[in-house]
């Protein structure tokens, strides 16, 4: 179950089912007096799981409302889909790095360009949008190799050229006025030929994620390398930093496809070679066949061979 789904909810269901099965076995062997303890433990576990899930989902809904309130406050007086909310979205689904090279090549290129990108792009954008250097926060880094390789396997079928954030930066602004100044500086660098805007994902205009989060994600070309620049509102980022536990629940329940997925055993299985996937398919079939055989035996022996007193236990096992 862990390998196939990496889903905590499914794992809990399987474990609770095992507990219930052993409870029935104990009841059958020990007789009257043990069923209440077994069923009580079963219900206690199930009740705890359901209560935790409900409370976490309520917390997720509260975060979603908080994102909405923060956005409404920052965008007060701004017409929806207005240019005051930043640039129009620009889709570029076929965007890739040049040369179709290896991970080592792109990581080395990103490391070589890092200081120049910081000096020629990020510092220029920061100075133009915030001359005092006291309002806008700029963060930049190189993507870690482990995360690059995971993203390649899981999202891009092993193609290193499809990873577009080897070199990345984030501008944290406190208002849409500051956001517009950052974008105006980006346009100026584009006009000067120092930067190429290749794609724009603007959730302030196109709509939020299913959790209500909004930001801007730009893919830009610098010296022939595709880089990523994010622009985030501080008010929303502060809320986002406190919701890791909620994100983990949403991932486990598959309720938020906009959250960046953690790497799971199931993901790694999907990224295996064709031969490995065939072997896993055979293994899954064998396990399913065995489970079907056992279920059939429970039905036959539970209904036909059990005594009248215990026959209902066989039917419950079959279910």
Image: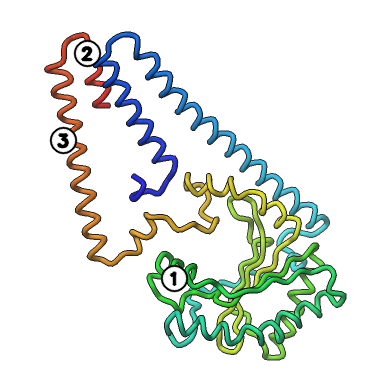
Q: Which residue is mark 2?
A: 310
Toward the viewer: 231 or 243? 243
Q: Residue farthest to the front?
A: 30
The residue at the point 71 percent across, 46 percent down is 66
Q: Which mark is residue 149?
A: 1
Is 282 on the left-hand or right-hand side of 225? Answer: left
**Vertical arrangement, residue 180 with respect to residue 188, above or below:** above
Query: Helix or strand or loop: what does disc 3 sit on?
Result: helix
- What's the coloring here? rainbow
Q: Which residue is mark 3?
A: 293
Residue 191: x %, y % from top left: 71, 88
- Marks 3 and 2, how far apart in space? 21 Å
Toward the viewer: 241 or 260? 241
Residue 131: x %, y % from top left: 85, 77
Query: Helix or strand or loop: what does disc 1 sit on?
Result: helix
Quadrant occupied by the C terminus: top left
Residue 167: x %, y % from top left: 59, 77
Q: Pick whichever of labels 3 and 1 is earlier in the sequence.
A: 1
Q: Answer few, some or many: residues within 10 Å of disc 1's Cα (few below 14, many 20 plus, some between 14 and 19).
A: some
């Amino acid at each position: 179950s862990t390998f196939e789904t990496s889903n905590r909810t499914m794992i809990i269901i399987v474990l609770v089912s095992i507990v219930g099965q052993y409870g029935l076995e104990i009841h059958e062997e020990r007789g009257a007096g043990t069923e209440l303890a077994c069923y009580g433990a079963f219900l206690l576990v199930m009740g705890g799981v359901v209560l935790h899930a409900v409370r976490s989902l309520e917390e997720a809904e509260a975060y979603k409302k908080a994102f909405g309130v923060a956005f409404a406050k920052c965008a007060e007086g701004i017409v929806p889909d207005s240019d005051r909310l930043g640039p129009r979205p620009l889709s570029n689904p076929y965007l890739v790095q040049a040369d179709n090279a290896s991970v080592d090549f792109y990581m080395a290129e990103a490391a070589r360009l890092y200081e120049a990108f910081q000096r020629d792009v990020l510092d220029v954008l920061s100075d133009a949008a915030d001359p005092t250097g006291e309002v806008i926060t700029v963060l930049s880094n190189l993507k870690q190799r482990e995360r690059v390789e995971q993203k390649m396997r899981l999202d891009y079928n092993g193609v290193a050229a499809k990873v577009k954030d080897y070199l990345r930066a984030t501008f944290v602004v406190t208002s849409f006025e500051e956001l517009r100044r950052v974008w105006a500086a980006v346009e100026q660098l584009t006009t000067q030929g120092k930067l190429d805007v290749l794609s724009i994902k603007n959730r302030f205009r196109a709509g939020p994620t299913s959790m209500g989060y909004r930001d801007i994600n730009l893919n830009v070309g610098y010296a022939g390398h595709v880089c990523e620049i994010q622009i985030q509102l501080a008010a929303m980022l502060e809320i986002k930093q406190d919701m890791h536990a909620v994100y983990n629940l949403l991932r486990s329940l598959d309720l938020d496809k906009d959250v960046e997925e953690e790497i799971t055993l199931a993901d790694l299985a999907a990224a295996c070679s064709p031969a490995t996937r065939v072997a896993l398919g055979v293994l899954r079939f064998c396990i399913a066949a065995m489970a079907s055989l056992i279920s059939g035996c429970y039905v036959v022996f539970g209904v036909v061979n059990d005594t009248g007193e215990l026959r209902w236990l066989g039917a419950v096992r079959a279910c």
